[in-house]
Image (cartoon, rainbow, N blue to C red):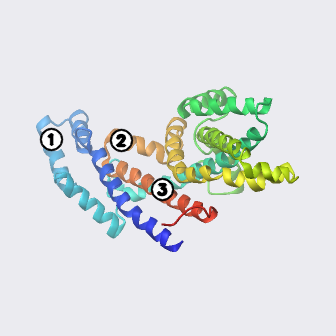
Amino acid sequence: MSRYVIRRVLMSIPTLFVISVVVFVVIQLPPGDYMTTVQLQLQSLGGLTEAEAAKVAQELRKVYGLDKPLYVQYLVWMKNIITRGDFGFSFQYRKPVADVIWERLGWTILIASLCHLISTLVGIMIGIFSATHQYRIGDYVATFFAFIGLSTPSFFLALVAMYILASRGIQPGGLFSQYYLFAPWSWGKFVDLLKHIWIPVVIVGLAGTARNMRVMRGNLLDILNQPYVLTARSKGLPERTVVFKHAVVNALHPIIMYQGMVLPFMISGEIVASTVLNIPTAGPMFYSALVSQDMYLAGSFLLLVAVFLVAGNLLADILLAWIDPRVRYD
């Protein structure tokens, strides 16, 4: 088992290297850079001529190393990340990228983790109920809402939620009401957070709940028709014991494998919902960085999401190897 874990960890290193190269190339693909935006601002707002603004922008490129070849910029970026934990400088926020990301990453991980936890537990329980009540009214209702959850975009759900809450006089955006926005932490602020945070959690977690429900239902239906389940029933075991002790355990394997990929999907859904609902997470920050071509900020966030994906897959593989004796370590 230990050799299997070490081998999987070592395999993750070249994967992260390739991902970092792809991320850096992708964020450089749009024409121009952040200094191009600065040049246009100097012309329109600063009153400089095109030549003067271009000269200032070129000097700034030299200061931040943006005039160097692409591979040199990449090597400097990776060297600073590995040796010093320095993800670069955010041109838009005028501060280190790490400071900008860490300010918002906590809320992002909190919302994504809550969505992940709730969607997994609720999806599994509904999937079990739907599989054990196949072709009954409960199964049809659960299947209908699962299709709705899978087919409805998160930004549309966010807009519908904003309209419904606004029509009822409830503040639809943000994580706190105006009174608690800048107040120190207290029990009242925590309760106020609970009143607001369920909105993005429901919006982002709906698709995950529907997906987990469909996967659990399909796998459990296959397991319930396996010979060993029929044998357990023929021995007179209670149906509850057959389902939860023998069938559900084996039906959970695809759910466990999916857990390694779910967090980045939750974060991407959180980006859309947070942008629409104006929540102070990494979503609006990432969108703004893409629009303004703040390359180090956008690239660092993508790289962190990729690290979450690789680490999640690694943990899912280890957990699956631990609970399933049929997994081979060779």
User: How far, Cα to Cα, is label 3 from label 2?
Assistant: 20 Å
Q: Secondary structure at mark 2?
A: helix
Residue under pointer 2:
290
Q: Secondary structure at mark 3?
A: helix
Residue 161 x %, y %: 62, 31
Tags 3 and 1 touching, CB below 8 Å: no
Query: How many labels sit on residues?
Result: 3
Give whichever of discs 3 and 2 has the lower sequence position.
2
Against 273, residue 121 (above or below) is: below
Regarding residue 39, the answer to whether it shows in the image is: yes
Horizontal arrangement in the rendering, residue 135 relative to residue 205 (left or right):
right
Where, by quadrant of the figure, is residue 292 drawn? top left
User: How far, Cα to Cα, is label 3 from label 1?
Assistant: 39 Å
Q: 274 or 278, which lies in front?
A: 274
Q: 15 or 322, which lies in front?
A: 322
Give whichever of discs 3 and 1 has the lower sequence position.
1
Q: Residues within 10 Å of mark 2 (few under 14, many from 20)?
A: some
Amino acid bearing label 2? Leu
Horizontal arrangement in the rendering, residue 89 relative to residue 220 (left or right):
left
Q: 151 or 1, which lies in front?
A: 1
Residue under pointer 3:
308
Residue under pointer 1:
54
Regarding residue 182, the answer to whether it shows in the image is: no
